[in-house]
């Protein structure tokens, strides 16, 4: 089948062919109306707010005109392509978008916007005299390969104000990506208001200075850095994303990467090993030795934190990190060693597994699912390293994901060697802050989330893929954009 009409569509659809008898296509003009069938009202509102703003056209609700954009939920499309599948048919009379579910309809509306060309992505018309917008005569059918198509945005290392997060929600939607994973806490900052524990943001959201570039750099930015999202900010982000069929997955990183929390509440740290009251929010990068203490006090504290997190984020998955947790303080801590003996654990690795399993069961009891970095596979009982329903973000290559899938756990593939966008894009000397592997646009495009070692049943546990944007070397939105694009388009 000819593919020429769809060369501008991203991602490339399953099928795109000229419409039989479609002539030169459809012209969107001042008389065009939106025929929103039952269940499509939110998509119609989005079209008016975005395409209407860019074109200056009213896109009025349908009355009796033939000149219209039809929005419809179609069970037949759902049976063929699933709830995120859609078809769009453009001919000389109308545009008909049918979705297997509301999400599929929304992705079809995104395709319509792409077909109108780059100026349809503006916020106001650049030519107020232009009153006609042409669409090619085309039939498109598409559905996603994976249920999880995500971007992880690290707002802990460098805070990204709310407007920047909302802009990234729109960028994800334009690329038909449906998960925004927000890395909200780390050694360098706590970015989420927790009303029960106000010092998490009063103290934990601010650091006195910032290491410039790689942790080996001798350079510092001596300006304080910080910021956080109020609970109403988060409600706004979550609602804005939901309108665009994007799930926001929160990450509260435990038991490592926790110095900002310990700086706010020193009793969370290993007080029998170090003077935790002297700790501030960390100002440099790397793996931090200051980890949470495995005490009942710590468990209750983070249960209370998660109660508020669950109230803000309806996501089934809650990410609890679990990565890069040094065990030196636990080895030296009498309290930690007593906890190991009390629980009959083999050592500090099993202690970390116990810590995360506690919260995995706690989440499961509330209808949620733990997801964590692939270190959560380590240190557990051989027959049950993770709670039922727990999932793994495989970042240190494919190995963790393969192990998890073979054990019957769901996996999101995000190997650093392929899809870490903080890594340099080019080997040249002029690449700003050149850290990590060289990962070109072509390298990202060639990324395959399902390793060939998995059987069909094991591969079914690969929920999808995610690109990760860690912001140690990305001090502002301009730099985040530079590192993320165009590689996210290839992803």
Image (spheres, grey):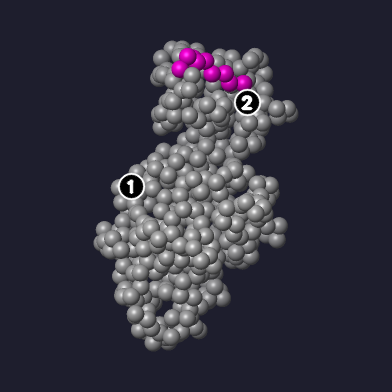
Q: Residues within 10 Å of mark 1 (few under 14, many from 20)?
A: some
- From the viewer's perspective, is 146 left or right of 50? right
Residue 100 screen position, x and y as percent = 53, 35
In front of the other: 288 or 395: 288
What residue is drawn where x is 63% and y is 23%? Answer: 138
Residue 92 or residue 418, whichever sits in front: 418
Q: Earlier in the sequence, mark 1 or mark 2?
A: 2
Instruction: Name the one closer to the observer, 342 or 466.
Output: 466
Query: On residue 173, which mark appears?
Result: none
Q: Residue 139, labelled with which disc?
A: 2
| Numbered disc 1: secondary structure | helix
Report how far apart the C-alphas of labels 1 and 2 lie in the structure: 40 Å
Q: Residue furthest right?
A: 1
Bounds of the magenta segment: 128-136
In the rendered view, does 271 fall on the left or right side of 19? Answer: left
Residue 231 spot, x, y in % from top left: 31, 51
Q: Is residue 297 above or below residue 238?
A: below
Residue 133 is one of the magenta-drawn residues: yes
Please give the residue where the numbered disc 1 appears in the rendered image: 233
Above or below 118: residue 417: below
Mark 2 Cα shell of 10 Å, populated few (<14), some (14-19), many (≥20): many
Residue at 41% from the left image edge and 53% from the top image edge: 159
Residue 447 in percent (x, y) is at 66, 51
- The reply to whether residue 366 is visible in this rendering is no
For image coordinates 33% across by 75% down, the residue present is 278
């Amino acid at each position: 089948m000819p593919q020429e009409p769809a060369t501008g569509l991203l991602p490339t659809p399953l099928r795109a062919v000229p419409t039989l008898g479609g002539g030169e296509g459809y012209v969107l003009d001042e008389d065009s109306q939106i025929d929103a069938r039952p269940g499509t009202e939110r998509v119609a509102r989005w079209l008016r707010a975005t395409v209407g703003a860019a074109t200056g056209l009213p896109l009025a609700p349908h009355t009796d005109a033939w000149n219209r954009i039809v929005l419809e939920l179609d069970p037949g499309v759902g049976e063929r392509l699933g709830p995120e599948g859609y078809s769009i048919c453009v001919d000389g009379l109308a545009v008909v978008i049918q979705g297997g579910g509301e999400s599929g309809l929304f992705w079809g509306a995104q395709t319509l916007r792409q077909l109108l060309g780059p100026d349809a992505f503006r916020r106001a018309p650049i030519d107020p005299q232009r009153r006609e917008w042409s669409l090619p005569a085309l039939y498109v059918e598409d559905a996603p390969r994976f249920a999880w198509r995500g971007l992880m945005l690290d707002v802990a290392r460098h805070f990204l104000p709310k407007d920047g997060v909302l802009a990234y929600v729109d960028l994800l939607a334009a690329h038909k990506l449906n998960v925004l994973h927000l890395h909200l806490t780390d050694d360098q900052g706590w970015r989420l208001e927790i009303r029960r524990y106000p010092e998490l943001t009063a103290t934990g959201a601010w650091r006195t200075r910032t290491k410039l570039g790689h942790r080996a750099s001798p350079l510092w930015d001596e300006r304080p850095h910080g910021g956080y999202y109020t609970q109403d900010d988060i409600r706004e982000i979550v609602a804005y994303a939901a309108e665009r069929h994007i799930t926001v997955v929160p990450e509260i990183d435990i038991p490592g990467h926790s110095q900002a929390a310990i700086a706010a509440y020193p009793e969370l740290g290993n007080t029998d090993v170090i003077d935790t009251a002297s700790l501030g929010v960390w100002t440099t990068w790397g793996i931090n030795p200051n980890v949470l203490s495995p005490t009942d006090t710590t468990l209750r504290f983070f249960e209370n934190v998660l109660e508020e997190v669950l109230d803000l984020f309806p996501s089934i998955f809650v990410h609890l990190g679990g990565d890069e947790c040094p065990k030196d303080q636990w080895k030296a801590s009498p309290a930690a060693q007593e906890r190991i003996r009390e629980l009959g654990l083999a050592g500090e690795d099993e202690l970390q597994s116990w810590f995360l399993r506690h919260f995995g069961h706690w989440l499961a009891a509330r209808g949620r699912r733990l997801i964590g970095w692939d270190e959560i596979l380590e240190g557990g009982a051989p027959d049950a390293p993770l709670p039922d329903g727990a999932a793994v973000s495989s970042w240190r290559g494919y190995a963790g994901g393969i192990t998890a899938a073979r054990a019957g756990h769901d996996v999101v593939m995000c190997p650093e060697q392929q899809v870490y966008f903080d890594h340099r894009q080019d080997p040249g000397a002029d690449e700003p802050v050149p850290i990590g592997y060289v990962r070109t646009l072509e390298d990202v495009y060639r990324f395959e989330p399902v390793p060939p070692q998995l059987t069909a049943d094991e591969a079914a546990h690969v929920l999808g893929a995610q690109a990760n944007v860690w912001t140690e070397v990305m001090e502002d939105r301009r730099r985040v954009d530079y590192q993320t694009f165009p590689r996210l388009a290839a992803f």
